[in-house]
Image (tube, rainbow, N blue to C red):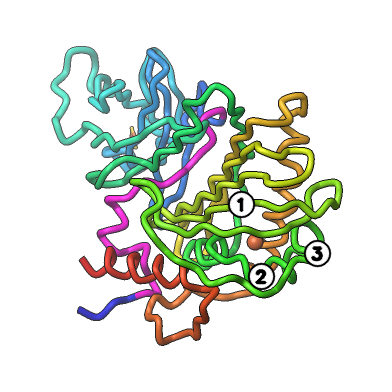
Amino acid sequence: MELRTDSFCSNPAMRTQWFVVADVADVADSPVGVTLLGTRFVLWRSPDGSLRAAHDRCPHREAPLSDGTVAGGCLVCPYHAWAFDADGACVAVPSSGPGAMIPSSAHLAMLAVRELYGLVWLCPGTPDGEPPEIPQDRDPSFRRVTAGIDTWHASSTRMVDNFCDVAHFPYVHAGTIGADTDPVVAPITVKQLEPDFIGYEYTVDVHDEQANIVRQRMSTAFHLPFVVRSNTCFESGPRLGHDRVLLLCATPIDDVTSMFTFVSWRNHDHDLSSEEFIAFDRAIGAEDKTMLERIEGVLPLEQSATVSVRSDRLSVEWRRRLAALLAN
Ligand code: FES
Ligand SMILES: [Fe+2]
């Protein structure tokens, strides 16, 4: 089967995967519309506070339900006020009068949704597994900070390739972590690091916020399709012996536009505010965004379409596995 990489969003395998679509704080009393894989979805909260998700299309005349309201424990369409309960059942058609028969085709098909790491994860089809496990989230010595969601005019394929890559640090990140770092990337051994992550371990000297050069033992790993986590253990400097976990998620709004989300966990600097916590990471993300928004289109998943060298080994493995997922 020929692999179409120019439109991975339309590949059915994508609909079995989990994607970050919102910050949990953004889904409160009103329905919220999100676009994932070129399709609109609506998120809302049921009376018990749990998240609900469905296609953002009223079965009556296709009005966007995300423009409606949540009232009386139901999602209410803005057009003719049909009301849908927490299970998606249509329970009111005002024009038919009370007690009238409601056709079963008026019910909404509910989609799989999870609240995890302060984020809303949505799977638009039948999920193949669960979102990736970050064990530090259950460790009370770690503090989690969710940095919100930004839109990048870049393909999620290019973002994950970038998240897997340290060879760009001295150039793209010269203004933050990359100044004076060694441009030579040590040979990479890719392996299954944790049940949910495949990656490699390495040691790197990078600049911290105070421009100190700090030795960090790191591991960077991916989870299909578009999640990367980077663990850091500080081996010198003021955070010696402490750890940081960074979760980087790309969500395809369409093939060439994405949401960028990052969450961090740290067992140090508990006196800092969340804003101080993430300001430096935001600056790093902004450097990658500027670079990637200059590169058009989807990263070709055929390995022969671009040239890879030894520092690209993790990205090559991620591309190989993503291509296999899409070919299934
Ligand atoms: S389009 Fe939703 S109630 Fe008519
Ligand atoms: Fe980067």
Amino acid under disc 1: Arg
Mark 3 falls on what kind of element? loop
Residue 209 left/right relative to 167: right
Comparing marks 3 and 1, which lies closer to the viewer?
1
According to the image, label 2 marks what residue?
A: 168
User: Cβ of disc 2 within 8 Å of ligand 2?
Assistant: yes
Q: Quadrant of residue 288?
A: bottom right
- Note whether 320 is above or below 51 in the view shown: below
User: Looking at the image, which is closer to me, 317 or 122?
Assistant: 317
Comparing marks 2 and 1, which lies closer to the viewer?
1
Badge 3 local density, few (<14 within 10 Å), some, or many (20+)? Answer: some
Label located before the other in sequence (2 or 1)? 2
Amino acid under disc 3: Ala
Q: Are marks 2 and 1 in contact (CB under 8 Å)?
A: no
Mark 2 falls on what kind of element? loop
Identify the disc placed on residue 179: 3
Amino acid under disc 2: His
Magenta extent: 5-25
User: Looking at the image, which is closer to me, 174 or 63?
Assistant: 174
Mark 1 falls on what kind of element? strand
Alpha-carbon span between mark 3 and mark 1: 18 Å
Identify the disc placed on residue 217: 1
Label located before the other in sequence (3 or 1)? 3
- Note whether 174 is above or below 98 in the view shown: below
Q: Quadrant of the C terminus?
A: bottom left
